[in-house]
Image: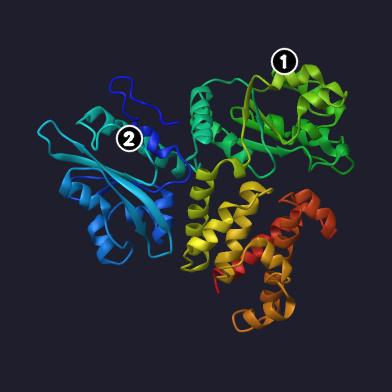
Amino acid sequence: MTKKNKNTGKPALDEFVEEYPSTLFVTDQNGNILISNEFTALTIGIHLEELLKANVQDLVKAGYYSHSITMEAIATKQKVTNTVNTSRGFHVFSSAIPILDKDGEVQLVVTTSNEFSQEHNYYEANVPVAQQIHKQLGGMAAEKKKGIVAESLAMKQIIKVCNQIASYDSKVLIYGESGTGKEVIAKYIHLKSEKWKGPFIPINCAAIAPALFEYELFGYEKGVLEGQTEVKAGMIEIANGGVLFLDEIADLPMEMQAKLLRVLENNEVRRVGGITNIPVHCRVIAATNRDLWSLVKKGLFREDLYYRINVIPIHIPPLRNRKLDLVGLISSFITSFNEMYGKKYVLSAEEFDKMLNQPWHGNVRELRNYIERLVVTEHVGQSIQEEEQIGDWFSLDHFIEKNKHQLASLKDFTAVAEGHYIKKVLQDCAGNGTEAAKRLNVDRSVIYRKLKKMEEVLRFK
């Protein structure tokens, strides 16, 4: 349901960007684009930055659009509704609504694919509203520069909470399925906090062997381990003055939970083999993809630790429930991989529709892998399921034929082949590096080292 302005009873302009997913133009009286969004850029296959420098008349002349209802609204000073066809095969039923000043002249035009029930065919002049819509989208653009795609209402609310709590040292517990971006949110809180100059120390509790946990977290004095002649500071000590990020905290062994609780209560740590307590002042952010409270009830997670870390809970919805973020991420990843691999891949309406309706159980991580595959292979027009049915693009003969000229040396070919196979296994494991390492029978660090090597080879080819 569309929100109404309390004073006028008309739809609030900031709600134009909250619906799923919609094209959006805010232009001046000459058709110069002041504000737009990622989905609009996707529909015509150009970068959002380029779109924001354009005039709608120039887009029509260049063939991106069949015609401009924005210019019709400027000429008639009335709301104009029609279907607009784009060069990438999108057919968008849109409305252009002029905002008039006190003299009845066009001040701004808001063009969107959403429907709005209203009594008038225009908005009266309202400068604060115009400023409000600039602030709304301007703030969104600023967050994206920090690595956050927050176009959905859910993610905007999460960012709002993060901004509110960043200046405090309250402990945060981030919930979300694997691949939803829990570490991205944790890093955002760190960068927005007063501890931004301090270290951000991530620890994946699922990736450390139980026997090594205490050494990794608390460090040790020299002589504790055979052959070890140096003192080693633990990860908690290293995080002093910054943020300690405990990812997958549900996998923290019970005996370590008690020791961690003591650190959180006393703000001090003692190295293994040491006799001195070392003061530490770091913010603790934990994350999990499991229901911690159910683990507490089963006796698998300490209740006192649960309450200690669960001061400010943040729930990140799965990507399939955040269609607007899906749009923003698709655009962002296409741009990133085009630059990385020197490609000019442009998404078609058909491919976009298929991607929009995928469940994305691996969330952002799965989406990123899939788009990289599209860009690298320029393989369009087939859904994920169709690709899997025909044996995928990684069939050995096809891969050799496609890359034999580009990857002439055996060393480069092996690096790329291994990298692609690792990516395939990672995708099958929903992005879980630990599980992929077990299937491949290698150490987890080997996976990321070989992926990095593949990227280096491809980048310079």
Residue type (three-letter) at the residue carrying disc 2: Ile
Rendered residue at 43%/64% (across/down): 89
Describe residue 181's horizontal placement relative to residue 216 as left or right: left
- Gap between marks 2 and 1 measured at Cα: 47 Å
Residue 154 versus residue 394 in the image, above or below: above
The mark closer to the camera, 2 or 1, is: 2
- From the image, which quarter does the N terminus lie in? top left
| 428 or 242: nearer the viewer | 428
Residue type (three-letter) at the residue carrying disc 1: Asn
Q: Position of residue 190 (x, y in %)?
A: 55, 32
Contact, CB < 8 Å: mark 2 with mark 1?
no
Please name the residue that numbered disc 2 is placed on: 133
- From the image, which quarter does the C terminus lie in? bottom right
Pointer 1 local density, CA inside 10 Å: few below 14, some 14–19, many at least 20: few
Disc sitting over residue 266 in the figure: 1
| 24 or 79: nearer the viewer | 79
The image's colouring method is rainbow
Rendered residue at 53%/23% (across/down): 165
